[in-house]
Image (tube, rainbow, N blue to C red):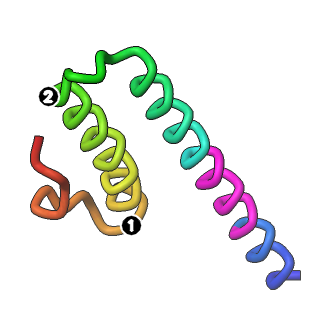
């Protein structure tokens, strides 16, 4: 019983992480289509912000966010 419960929790976490990845990808494509092609400053900002969200969420769920590990904006 414990093994099944642990696996179910792991699987639910995997599903949720997959949802975050898909939503981040969709948001990146939205920014790609909205921003002008020569607006590299905003494109870089949003790309780093999306990546930092994933890194900071991982840190929050584990042992705390390590600011040195995040991409500098």
Say left or right for 45 vs 68. Answer: right
Secondary element under disc 2, as helix, strand or loop, is: helix
Say left or right for 19 vs 2. Answer: left
Q: How many marks?
A: 2
Q: Which mark is residue 41?
A: 2
Marks 1 and 2, how far apart in space?
32 Å
The magenta-colored residue range is 10-19
Marks 1 and 2, the one that precedes in the sequence:
2
Residue that badge 1 annotates: 62
Q: Are marks 1 and 2 in contact (CB under 8 Å)?
A: no
Q: Which mark is residue 13?
A: none
The residue drawn where x is 42% and y is 59% is 61
Where's the N terminus, which quadrant? Answer: bottom right
Reply above or below: 11 against 26.
below
Mark 1 neighbour density, 10 Å: few (under 14) some (14–19) many (20 or more) = few
Observer-nearest residue: 44 or 70?
44
Reply above or below: 13 against 26.
below
Can you give x and y, in whole percent of width and height, for residue 22 in the image?
61, 43
The residue drawn where x is 75% and y is 66% is 11
The residue drawn where x is 56% and y is 45% is 20
Q: Quadrant of residue 42?
A: top left
Mark 2 neighbour density, 10 Å: few (under 14) some (14–19) many (20 or more) = few
Say left or right for 54 vs 63. Answer: right
Can you give x and y, in whole percent of width and height, for residue 25 in the image?
52, 41
Can you give x and y, in whole percent of width and height, for residue 70 in the image?
19, 55
Residue 14 belongs to the span the image colors magenta: yes
Reply above or below: 54 against 46.
below
Observer-nearest residue: 36 or 70?
36
Q: Quadrant of residue 53?
A: top left
The secondary structure that dominates the magenta segment is: helix
Q: Nearer the viewer, mark 1 or mark 2?
A: 2
């Amino acid at each position: 019983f414990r093994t099944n419960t642990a696996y179910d929790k792991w699987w639910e976490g995997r599903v949720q992480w997959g949802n975050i990845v898909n939503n981040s990808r969709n948001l990146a494509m939205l920014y790609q289509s909205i921003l002008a092609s020569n607006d590299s400053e905003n494109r870089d900002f949003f790309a780093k912000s999306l990546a930092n969200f994933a890194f900071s969420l991982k840190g929050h769920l584990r042992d705390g966010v390590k600011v040195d590990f995040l991409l500098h904006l």
